[in-house]
Image (tube, rainbow, N blue to C red):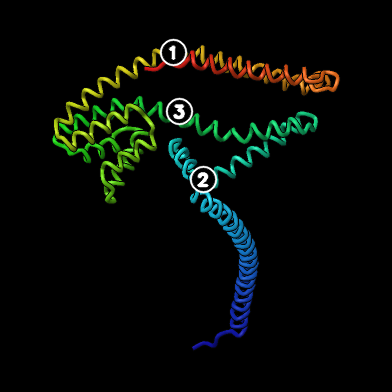
Amino acid sequence: MSMINPVVILAVAGGMAVLLLVVGLVISLRSERQSDYEARMQRYTSEMMDEEQIRQDEEMRKRALTDWMNQRMQRTSFGERISRELARADLKLKAGEYIALMVIAAVGTGFVAWFIGSQSLFLGLLGAVLGLFLPRFYVKRQQQARLHRFNEQLPDMLSLMVNGLRAGFSTVQAMESVSKELPPPICDEFRRVVQEMQLGVPMEKALANLVQRVPSDDLDMVITAINVQREVGGNLAEILDTISYTIRERVRVQGEIRVLTTQVAYSGRFLSLLPVLMLVAMYIMNRDYVMEFFSPDAGMCGYIAMGVSALLIIFGGVAMNKLSQIDY
């Protein structure tokens, strides 16, 4: 048996030592990088957690303020009226949030008018008053648009209910099919009616709540027919079919009348706003000229002229509005 050369043993041992040294260095460097990475991530996540905590605290303070305002508004008839108006416009706002939006709009519009009008307090107050009514104008516009879409979908809803009743559905099942088959906003309203009845609300009360949310004369006629049929009996499908034909004809006639009266309505609004806009523009461009109406030399003549002009503008706007409105 031959002896192993000591040089080979030393070479192998030295190679293994070098290999272990390299492995150790690599592992140590990776651990240091990992620790640096973890430290940076921990610092970053801690900062993110601090920012998230600050944001949550801020939201809680804002929520506490809005909740306090909502609780105060819900106890008054004014808050209930605002909630009903917001529900008719299908806006996901509470009464307190709506009041806060009005205040923000008034302050913002007043500041813009004050800045544009060369720091005029009069224009600032005028802009604040205008901004105070901007949310209300938007809510009214949304109500009218939603009511118009609802009335246009009402004949299709009646046709679907009639087909369901003739197929053997109950009234609740026919309403549920309406909530599933038709597009918004009519499907949302009937889905709410079905959910209220599933929670134990009587059908008459659920339908009365529907009329409060959607003040439509055609819908009121349909609900009256349903309530009368439940009390005295009769063929509800035939009744709704007749009402559907009547509503379709009314919608057609309303569309024709709207086409003929739209020009008159918008002309009246534009002519009513034109003197006011001209006065504001002249006040911005040449304030001294407009203030001649209120100078001591003019006396009461300037105030009388402004008052008579305001009355004529109001009467003209009302007259044009009445001409464009036709009862049908």
Measured from the top left, where is residue 13 in percent x and y?
A: 60, 81
Q: Residue at x 38, y 37 (%)?
A: 212
**Considering only vertical position in the picture, is 7 above or below 82?**
below
Q: Identify the amino acid type marked 1.
A: Val
Q: Secondary structure at mark 2?
A: helix
Q: Residues within 10 Å of mark 2 (few under 14, many from 20)?
A: many
Q: Residue at x 60, y 19 (%)?
A: 314
**Considering only vertical position in the picture, is 40 above or below 278?**
below
Q: Secondary structure at mark 1?
A: helix
Q: Which mark is residue 294?
A: none
Q: Residue 157 versus residue 310: which sits nearer the camera?
A: 310
Q: Secondary structure at mark 3?
A: helix
Pointer 2 residue: 95
Q: Residue at x 32, y 18 (%)?
A: 250
* Residue 77 appears left or right of 29: left
**Considering only vertical position in the picture, is 23 above or below 199?**
below
Name of the residue lying farthest toward the front: 300
Q: Are marks 2 and 1 in contact (CB under 8 Å)?
A: no
Residue 286 visible to the viewer: no
Q: Identify the amino acid type marked 2.
A: Ala
* Residue 70 appears left or right of 209: right
Pointer 3 residue: 144
* Residue 228 appears left or right of 218: left
Pointer 1 residue: 259
Q: Residue at x 53, y 52 (%)?
A: 72
Measured from the top left, where is residue 224 in percent x and y?
A: 26, 32
Q: CA distance from mark 1 to mark 3?
A: 16 Å
